[in-house]
Image (cartoon, rainbow, N blue to C red):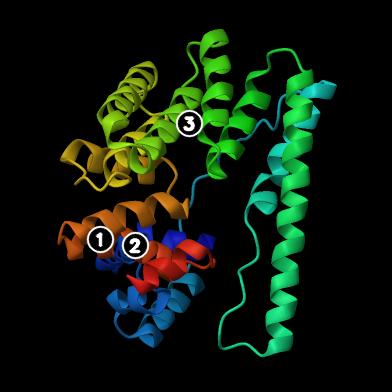
């Protein structure tokens, strides 16, 4: 690794290789496969020969004295019982809420029965976990992390009134928090999308006001940007440029998160901007991990 770094950045014999490396890294960042990105180097055997020759010759270097680490004690924060319990529940959240897929028509009767049982057992376990979570949070004094966990869980399960109640408690006690107004906004957006038309405009307006205020508190907070974007797409409206740029900022802040890439890519496709959508979703499609979002991106 040291030799390759030295060769690409400091070799005077092959200055074009530094440009090729930048092109290679850029291609990977834009979702190209490793094999596709490597084509910028041309003949890889020739590149290997150049690296070998570079490694065999004498190379000038500078010696830098390093004093070593200072004798400073590490910073350790002890979690209280409540914080530890909330952290434990937070780590379980996705595995509890995401259920195994239902059976499909191409399965055998035995496979269908097994899949249905897995799904039903997971749903029952999820419902039991949610009941315990609600009871635990109700017994605590106002705790922002516990209430935010409950708000997210309720919102993701479609229990929007319960989500709003939990978020409102955080907003009242911790006015600088940006996550609670974002979850409340997402709940209002879903109520607007699925509720009576007479309440739609007021709910959307309230949701956007919440996330706009949260964005002013912290312009780089991810959730208000996502909620603002969804305040258009989830109700079938075309996302304006400001919402699209907000989601681009989200991708910069959390580049490995699959859902923002999928949401933005789908909206760009809907706006007939296929080239931009492809650039956004290629890292998701060609990434080294699999996810439900990846499969949806491939279907798009």
**Label 3–label 1 contact, CB within 8 A:** no
Q: Residues within 10 Å of mark 3 (few under 14, many from 20)?
A: many
For the C terminus, give its image quadrant. bottom left
Residue 60 horizontal/vertical position (percent): 46, 55
**Label 2–label 1 contact, CB within 8 A:** yes
Give the SS element for disc 3. Answer: helix
In this view of the protein, which residue sits in the foreground, 211 or 47? 211
The numbered mark, 2 or 3, whose residue comes first in the sequence reads 3
Q: Residues within 10 Å of mark 1 (few under 14, many from 20)?
A: many
Q: Which residue is mark 3?
A: 183
Residue 223 appears in the figure: no
Q: Which residue is mark 2?
A: 281
Give the SS element for disc 1. Answer: helix
Image quadrant assignment for residue 186: top left
Question: Which residue: 50% across, 74% down?
Answer: 56
Question: Which residue: 53% across, 9% down?
Answer: 172
The numbered mark, 3 or 1, whose residue comes first in the sequence reads 3
In this view of the protein, which residue sits in the foreground, 38 or 72? 38
- Horizontally, residue 10 falls left or right of residue 278, namely right
Residue 98 horizontal/vertical position (percent): 62, 55
Position above or below: 103 against 216? below
- Horizontally, residue 116 falls left or right of residue 85, namely left
Position above or below: 244 against 293? above
For the N terminus, give its image quadrant. bottom right
Q: Which mark is residue 277?
A: 1
Count of numbered circles on the image: 3
In this view of the protein, which residue sits in the foreground, 196 or 76? 196
Residue 242 appears in the figure: yes
Which label sits in the foreground, 2 or 3?
Answer: 3
Which label sits in the foreground, 3 or 1?
Answer: 3
């Amino acid at each position: 690794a040291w030799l390759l770094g030295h060769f690409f950045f400091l070799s005077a014999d092959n200055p074009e290789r530094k440009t090729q490396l930048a092109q290679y890294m850029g291609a990977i960042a834009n979702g190209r496969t490793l094999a596709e990105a490597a084509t910028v180097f041309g003949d890889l055997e020739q590149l290997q020969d150049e690296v070998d020759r570079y490694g065999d010759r004498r190379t000038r270097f500078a010696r830098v004295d390093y004093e070593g680490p200072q004798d400073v004690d590490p910073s350790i924060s002890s979690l209280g019982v409540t914080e530890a319990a909330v952290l434990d529940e937070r780590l379980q959240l996705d595995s509890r809420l995401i259920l195994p897929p239902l059976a499909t028509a191409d399965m055998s009767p035995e496979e269908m029965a097994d899949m249905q049982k897995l799904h039903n057992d997971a749903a029952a376990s999820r419902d039991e976990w949610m009941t315990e979570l609600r009871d635990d949070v109700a017994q605590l004094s106002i705790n922002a992390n516990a209430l935010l966990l409950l708000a997210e869980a309720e919102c993701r399960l479609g229990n929007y009134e319960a989500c709003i109640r939990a978020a409102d408690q955080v907003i009242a006690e911790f006015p600088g928090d940006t996550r609670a107004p974002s979850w409340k906004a997402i709940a209002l957006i879903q109520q607007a999308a699925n509720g009576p038309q007479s309440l739609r405009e007021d709910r959307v307006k309230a949701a956007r006001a919440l996330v706009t205020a949260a964005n002013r508190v912290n312009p780089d907070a991810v959730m208000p940007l996502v909620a603002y974007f969804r305040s258009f797409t989830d109700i079938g409206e075309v996302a304006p440029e400001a919402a699209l740029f907000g989601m681009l900022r989200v991708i910069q802040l959390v580049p490995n998160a699959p859902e923002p890439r999928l949401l933005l890519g789908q909206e760009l496709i809907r706006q007939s901007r296929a080239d931009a959508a492809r650039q956004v979703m290629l890292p998701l499609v060609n990434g080294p991990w699999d996810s439900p979002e990846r499969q949806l991106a491939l279907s798009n």
